[in-house]
Amino acid sequence: MTAKSAAAAARATVYGYPRQGAGRELKKAIEGYWKGRVTAEALKETATELRRSTWQRLAAAGVHEVPTGDFSYYDHVLDTSVMVGAVPRRHRSAVDADALDGYFAMARGTQDVAPLEMTKWFDTNYHYLVPELGPDTVFSADSTKQVAEFKEALALGLAARPVLVGPVTYLLLAKPAPGVAADFEPLTLLDRLLPVYASVLADLRAAGAEWVQLDEPALVQDRTPADLNAAERAYRDLGALTDRPKLLVASYFDRLGDALPVLAKAPIDGLALDFTDAAAANLDALAAVGGLPGKRLVAGVVNGRNIWINDLEKSLATLGTLLGLADQVDVAASCSLLHVPIDAAAERDIDPQILRWLAFAQQKTGEIVTLAKGLAQGTDTIAAELAANRADLASRAGSAITHDPAVRARAAAVTDADGRRSQPYTERATAQRAHLGLPLLPTTTIGSFPQTTELRAARADLRAGRIDTAGYEQRIENEIREVISFQEKTGIDVLVHGEPERNDMVQYFAEQLTGYLATQHGWVQSYGTRYVRPPVLAGDISRPEPMTVRWTSYANSLTERPVKGMLTGPVTMLAWSFVRDDQPLGDTARQVALALRDEVNDLEEAGTSVIQVDEPALRETLPLRSADRPAYLDWATESFRLTTSGVRPDTQIHTHMCYAEFGDIVQAIDDLDADVISLEAARSHMQVARELAEHGYPREAGPGVYDIHSPRVPSADEAAALLRKGLEAIPAERLWVNPDCGLKTRGWPETRASLENLVAAARTVRGELSAS
């Protein structure tokens, strides 16, 4: 096929779309179902309508082939576990009794049964449910969901492409089931899994699917020869099937590297690659292997993870280069649009000029369609769009919002000494123990307490003018008093004010820093029914005035016990925002760190002796390729130290991380030089405590003993058992007792019971230690 005819064949498509609905209808329906206010049938009707409206919107925009199967009630990896029959033994009776309730039990747990572990989806802020597999795992195909959703799209008269998590990525994301040896490799189950995928593919083909997309993002990470051999075998065997649709294997988030020639040679029908800046090397690599003769290439040239408008002319140049490398070149985003909000046009409070710099899922779909039209029909057909795009890009580049000379001068003046504490940890620890007077195994929480309906109503009342600022602040003071009183009565040693004034741990600060933009409708799924509104980091960052001192000082006035000041760290401020793409991330992190440093110093000056700077995103932002990690960790750890190093030796600096694999960043955790770190550990059964011990981590740590992402209340005995396991790795004088994460998403009844059990567990184990 000539380049000209390949261009004529260019079509627009996407790999996936936000699931929640413009008004978060899915979240409301699912949570209503959990509370018994919404029937299963009503929930299913809501889901069906959301799928229908999404597909029709995509088709109306000009998308040739809509994705199916990417919709989920909770998580697409959990859906894959159901599809292949990998239901943990402890959940089988629940699934057998009621498939929907059993599904949610795997995701959330019950009072009697723990849920699946949850962790980050590659380097995004989306969380997936980790499959649990072992040598005795028996897979079985259940294509019900995938076939039904595909048929829904067909019934609407749409061309559709089912999307599945690929078999290699599924196994690489899995972990050994409880009771299985830790060195068990789930990838050894590949030959057992492939027939199940073959069966699902046959069912989809029978339903009328011409193409099926198999997502293999795990292949953009550093992979061993065994991993690559598994990928070769998987697609050799699946490609050799006679009763199958055409196979499109998709990768995203980074360059494909050594896996690209493996997939290029495989007997599959197409390859989807990321061609955004993060994966620009894919273009040269594809050319080096001779392209994809006779195959389809889906080119991800629109960034599916950030919200800035595309440089259409740059993308067209990339697409033009690709035309000679495949028989058919189609246009897509770099990954599923799950990771961006739905529609920028819904924003009413952002300056119209700035709004033209932003592209959410709906706008990105328009960009994809425009690029496909330009590629297929020539740039003259999109001349107006190109001219408007050039003007918008120039407007952003020349804006005063993006360049503040004072901020840049301050960042340029930073020295190495600014990022170092005045004394080493051993000396600081002595000073802090004398100053704070805490018991062995001190108890604390991570920061937030339940965000009640009353608190959300108070914020809504303030925005609507139904109450004035004084009335709102009185409600916040009342809540802080209750939170402090509860903690004192429960016996917690280091208290928090509960963060009742905060809407979100990043947004709250972003709204008070220059250079950030806040959205009203920019919701993005974090996990399950948890949605966040990432702020937009649009320009240079500074802090006009203190952000947390007033409420922390008020809480301190109510108690003789230490109250932690609570801040979100610079890496997390970046990771959970939509970051600017016009300067290096390290430069932006330094600006944020300097603004937070001012806040830390003001908290200390106001009498706060314990300050927690949360960095849950340090691991999730870790580059997927090891070669890219040292540079990232250098600026990430430097920005944390720059935030925290201006305090006295007797001020205790805490940090917190959750829901990630920590083993490969333990040295970076050490390099933060925090006095105390708290980490998720309950679902992973204290794995991180062992990893810290193996590293020789010298500071204090609080591996969580209460999984807050589940509604179940852990008993005091259960918490004590986890605490004893933690003591096997961390000495008692350096071990803290705390939940896995903040309590914002939990209700008060379960929070009270769980924290009372946590304190009881700490007392029990203290008693055991004193008696030994």
Image (spheres, grey):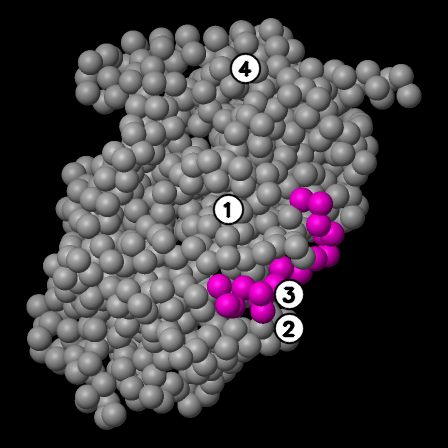
Mark 3 crowd level (few <14, some 14–19, many ≥20, 10 Å Cα): some
Indicate which label's residue lies in the foreground, 4 or 1.
1
Indicate which label's residue lies in the foreground, 3 or 2.
3
Q: Where is mark 2, residue-wise?
A: 226
Query: How many angstroms separate mark 3 from mark 4 (CA)?
Result: 44 Å
Query: How many angstroms separate mark 4 from mark 2 (CA)?
Result: 48 Å
Instruction: Find numbered disc 1 in the image and state the secondary structure of the residue it sits on.
Output: strand
Give how far across and how far down residue 615 sits, in percent.
54, 40
Instruction: Find numbered disc 4 in the image and state the secondary structure of the residue it sits on.
Output: helix
450 is higher (above) or lower (below) than 667: above
Give how far across and how far down residue 4 sits, in percent.
19, 89
Instruction: Please tell me which of labels 1 and 3 falls first in the chain.
Output: 1
Q: Quadrant of residue 20?
A: top left
Instruction: Please tell me which of labels 4 and 1 falls first in the chain.
Output: 1
The residue located at (50%, 80%) in the rendering is 236
On residue 188, the disc is: 3
Instruction: Find numbered disc 2 in the image and state the secondary structure of the residue it sits on.
Output: helix
Q: Where is mark 4, residue-wise?
A: 752
Mark 2 crowd level (few <14, some 14–19, many ≥20, 10 Å Cα): few
Residue 514 lies in the magenta-colored region? no
Residue type at mark 4: give it.
Arg
Q: Quadrant of the C terminus?
A: top right
